[in-house]
Image: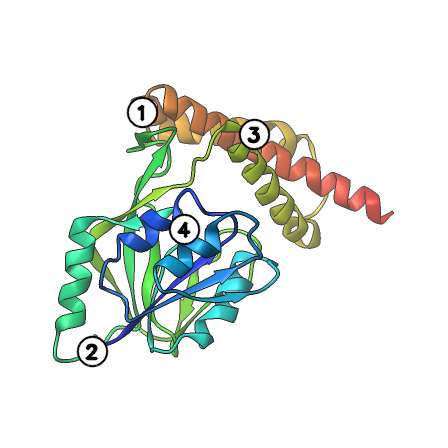
Amino acid sequence: MKITLIVPTYNEEKVLDRCIGSTKDLADEILVVDSFSTDNTLEIAKSHGARIIQRKYENSASQKNWAIPQASFSWILLLDADEWLTQKLYEELKQIKAQDCEPIESGFWIYRSNHFMGKRVRYSGWQGDKVVRLFKKEDCSYKIQSVHSEIITSGKLSFLRSSLNHDTYKGISAWEEKLERCAQWQAQDYSQKMGKVTLFHILIKPAFRFFKHYILSGGFLDGYIGFRISKYAAWSVWLRYKKVIKIRSNRE
C-alpha cells in the first residue's frame, strides 16, 4: 500500500513544515497543490521533496478534486496545512500501511482535536468534529460546495481510533478575514436557494447560534475561548445573511 500525501496551500510558511513533518516517512509521495503563494511556502515544500502543482483557487472542493487524480498512488492522505498528525495517529497509519492486504474500505473518518488561540477546544460545538483524510482516490471525491465540503463515496467508510490535530487560528485579524471569506462563499450558495431574508435570519438565527455553541454545546466549559468561539459563530451567521442581501441588491 503506497500513499500520496496531498496538502493544499496558500501562504502557509508558518505551518507547512509542521504538517508535512508530522507524516515523517509515511508518504511515498508528497504533492503540494498551491494557489500561487507569495511567501516561503514553496521553498518549505521543496525541502521536504514535494512535487508542486499550482492552480488558481476557486474553492476547497474544486482544488482538492483537481489535485487527487494527479497523485501517483491510489491511497491519498489529504491534510490541510493547519493540520498535523498526532504520534498515535502516525503509528496507526503505519500499521495500516504495513498490512499484507489493502483495506477493504474506501476511506476512513478521523476525529479532529481542535485548537483556538493556543488552547485545546473540548466543547463549544467543536467536539465530535471529524473528517475523511485517508481514502482511495478511485472511490472518493469532494462534494462541490463553497465551504466545508465533505468526501462523497460509493464505498465503505470506517473510523480510525486516533485523532488529528487542527489549529486554524493565525490571529484575530486573520480569523475574522477567514470568517468574512467563508460568509461570502456561503452567501453565494444561499442566495441561489433560499427565500427572502427576514429579521428571523438577521436576529434570531445568530442569537440561537450563540446559545447553541455556548450553552447547548458546553462552550462555557471552555471558558473565555468558548465565549469567543460562540460569539464568532453568531457573527458569521449574521454576516452570511447580510451578504446575501448585498448580493441580491447588486443583481437588481
Q: Amino acid at mark 4?
A: Ala
Q: Nearer the viewer, mark 4 or mark 1?
A: 4
Question: Spatial distance from mark 3 to mark 4, Cα to Cα?
Answer: 25 Å
Q: Amino acid at mark 3?
A: Trp
Q: Which residue is mark 2?
A: 102
Q: Which residue is mark 4?
A: 81
Q: Nearer the viewer, mark 2 or mark 4?
A: 4
For residue 184, which quarter of the picture?
top right
- Contact between labelled residues 4 and 3, with CB atoms less than 8 Å apart: no
66 or 108: nearer the viewer = 66
Question: Spatial distance from mark 2 to mark 3, Cα to Cα?
Answer: 45 Å
Q: Secondary structure at mark 1?
A: helix
Residue 120 at what x, y percent from top left?
29, 32
Residue 16 at what x, y percent from top left?
39, 50
Residue 57 at what x, y percent from top left?
59, 58
- Viewed as shown, does residue 133 lie left or right of 25? right
For residue 161, which quarter of the picture?
bottom left
Q: Which residue is mark 3?
A: 235
Question: Spatial distance from mark 1 to mark 2, Cα to Cα?
Answer: 40 Å
